[in-house]
Image (cartoon, grey):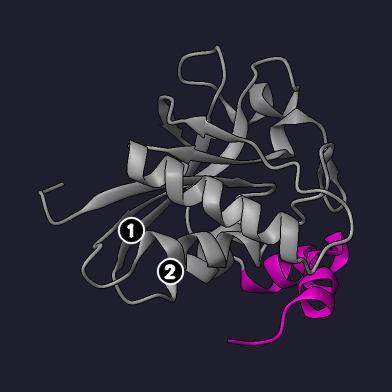
Amino acid sequence: MDDSQKLATFAGGCFWCMVGPFQAEDGVLQVKSGYTGGRTENPTYEEVCSNQTGHVEAIQLTYQPEKISYQRLLKIFWQNIDPTDAGGQFNDRGESYETAIFYHDEDQKQLAEESRREFDENGPFSAPIVTPIRPAAPFYDAEQYHQDYHLKNPFHYQLYKKGSGRESFIKTYWRED
């Protein structure tokens, strides 16, 4: 990664559903699915799903700030999760599916805090925002079969996204940009 690129890390429940919305953006160079925030080095999917490692499923982006702002990335993040759910996301329950913003520098921390405050005060949710903002931790790439899952297995992915409740939630709370 060169000086014209930065990292952003978000946990939004199942990482399969978080990759596509970011990949579609000009200035996002790479989106990796993985695990972060826990105690275990190089965890496996099975270990993370056991809710014994402290890790959450997350995505890590490499992006070009001169083409896409961190504020835009935050907006995409908020519009693809239920930030009022502390127990997971949609049908996926447990700590490995909790939401979080992992900041890589003080600017990201400040922008994330401002963004969370704005959503907490101005909706569209009546319940409080519970998504934490944490310092970035080691990020471990998920197994290869999880990378770009929405492209490799589009039929199963669409069934999952709809069946989990994420798709209808997004349509209920967000209009298309």
Q: Is residue 67 depicted above or below 107 in this figure?
A: below
- Answer whether residue 156 is magenta in the image: yes
Res. 133 visible in picture: yes
Residue 47 placement, left or right of 44: right
Q: Quadrant of the C terminus?
A: bottom right
Looking at the rendered structure, the kind of residue marked 1 is Gln
- Answer whether residue 100 is magenta in the image: no
> Label 1, on which residue?
30
Res. 146 visible in picture: no
* Crowd around label 2: few <14 · some 14–19 · many ≥20 (10 Å): some
Q: Is residue 97 depicted above or below 64 in this figure?
A: above
Looking at the rendered structure, the kind of residue marked 2 is Gln
User: What residue is shown at x 44% (from left), y 40% (from top)?
Assistant: 109
Indicate which disc, 1 or 2, sits on the residue closer to the N terminus. 2
User: What residue is shown at x 25% (from left), y 62% (from top)?
Assistant: 65
Residue 172 placement, left or right of 146: right
Label drawn at residue 23: 2
- Classified by dominant secondary structure, the portion drawn in magenta counts as helix
Q: The residue tagged with tag 2: helix, strand or loop?
A: helix
Q: CA distance from mark 1 to mark 2?
A: 7 Å
State the image coordinates of residue 143 (x, y, percent, origin top left): 49, 38
Q: In the image, which residues are magenta?
A: 154-177
State the image coordinates of residue 66 (x, y, percent, origin top left): 21, 68
Near-viewer residue (23 or 43): 23
Task: Kindly check if marks 1 and 2 are in contact, taking CB atoms under 8 A apart as contact.
Answer: no
State the image coordinates of residue 169 (x, y, percent, origin top left): 83, 69
Q: Quadrant of residue 126?
A: bottom right
